[in-house]
């Protein structure tokens, strides 16, 4: 079971990296084409900016979830730098993770409602008539993944608090997640 979960986590991270790479390449190619068309050929391609918008939003939301998985997202931990007690720091990180999880669940629910609304009242882009649901799903996927990684982070923080080692780990790494899953399975049996 643990090997399956660890390989699934590795596959998810790998898929996110590939999605970010492909989207970034599409955005770069699109912007390069736009600049060349405008300044070299003194013309424009109708609707090129709407073609660039879709991979840009996918890159943004998948990138945000990837940063959440790696714990490289922007955070304000000023309070922790003034507290010398490691246990108190661990409690603060756990409280922050609980609040982040609550916010993530709310945002994921709103994103779900956003996609549901997009399916009920389909709209498309003006030039190429690309369904806007392609962008709306990016918002949902991004928030769901961020919430998932926040839940894994919370589990890790709680496990660290119980073990008495409140050292902040660097990332929600696959091996760390697998160790947490092992610990959870051992407690159940």
Image (spheres, grey):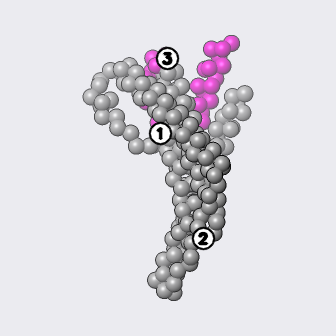
Task: From the viewer's perspective, tell me whether residue 96 is left or right of residue 85.
Answer: right
Residue 39's place in the image compared with 174, above or below, is: below
In the picture of the structure, the residue carrying the numbered disc 2 is 127
- In magenta, the rendered stretch is 161-189
Q: Considering only order in the chain, which callout, 2 or 1, is on the residue closer to the N terminus?
A: 1
Instruction: Answer with left or right where residue 187 lies relative to residue 27.
Output: right
The disc, 2 or 3, on the residue closer to the chain's N-terminal end is 2
Q: Is residue 173 above or below residue 42?
A: above
Residue 43 showing in the rendered view: yes
Looking at the image, the residue that sits furthest to the bottom is 41
- Which picture quadrant has residue 94? top left
Asked if residue 141 is positioned above or below residue 106 in the image, the reply reads: below
- Point out the tag, 1 or 3, that comes first from the N-terminus: 1
Residue 12 — which label?
none
Tag shown at residue 163: 3
- Mark 1 to mark 2 CA distance (whole Å): 39 Å
- Residue identifier under label 1: 71
Is residue 167 at all visible to an observer of this figure?
Answer: no
Q: Give the quarter of the figure containing the N terminus.
A: top right
113 to 44, vertically: above or below: above
Q: Quick check: is 180 in the magenta stretch?
A: yes
Crowd class of label 3 (few under 14; some 14 to 19; many from 20; radius 10 Å): few
Tell me the CA gap for discs 1 and 3. 21 Å
Query: Which image quarter is the C terminus in?
Result: top right
Q: Main secondary structure of the magenta part?
A: helix
Query: At numbered mark 3, what does the secondary structure look like: helix, strand or loop?
Result: helix
The total of numbered circles placed on residues is: 3
Residue 135 horizontal/vertical position (percent): 59, 54
Quadrant of the rendered image containing residue 46: bottom right
């Amino acid at each position: 079971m643990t090997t399956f979960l660890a390989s699934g986590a590795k596959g998810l991270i790998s898929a996110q990296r590939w999605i970010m790479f492909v989207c970034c390449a599409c955005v770069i190619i699109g912007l390069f084409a736009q600049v060349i068309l405008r300044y070299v050929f003194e013309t424009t391609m109708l609707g090129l900016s709407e073609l660039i918008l879709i991979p840009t939003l996918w890159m943004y939301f998948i990138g945000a979830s990837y940063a959440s998985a790696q714990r490289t997202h922007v955070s304000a931990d000023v309070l922790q730098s003034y507290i010398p007690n490691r246990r108190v720091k661990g409690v603060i990180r756990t409280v922050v993770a609980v609040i982040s999880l609550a916010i993530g669940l709310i945002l994921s629910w709103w994103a779900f409602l956003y996609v549901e609304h997009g399916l009920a009242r389909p709209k498309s882009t003006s030039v190429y008539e690309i369904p806007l649901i392609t962008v709306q799903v990016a918002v949902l996927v991004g928030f769901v993944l961020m919430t998932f990684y926040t839940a894994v982070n919370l589990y890790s923080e709680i496990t660290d608090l119980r073990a008495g080692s409140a050292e902040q780990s660097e990332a929600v790494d696959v091996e760390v997640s697998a160790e947490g899953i092992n610990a959870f399975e051992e407690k159940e049996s």
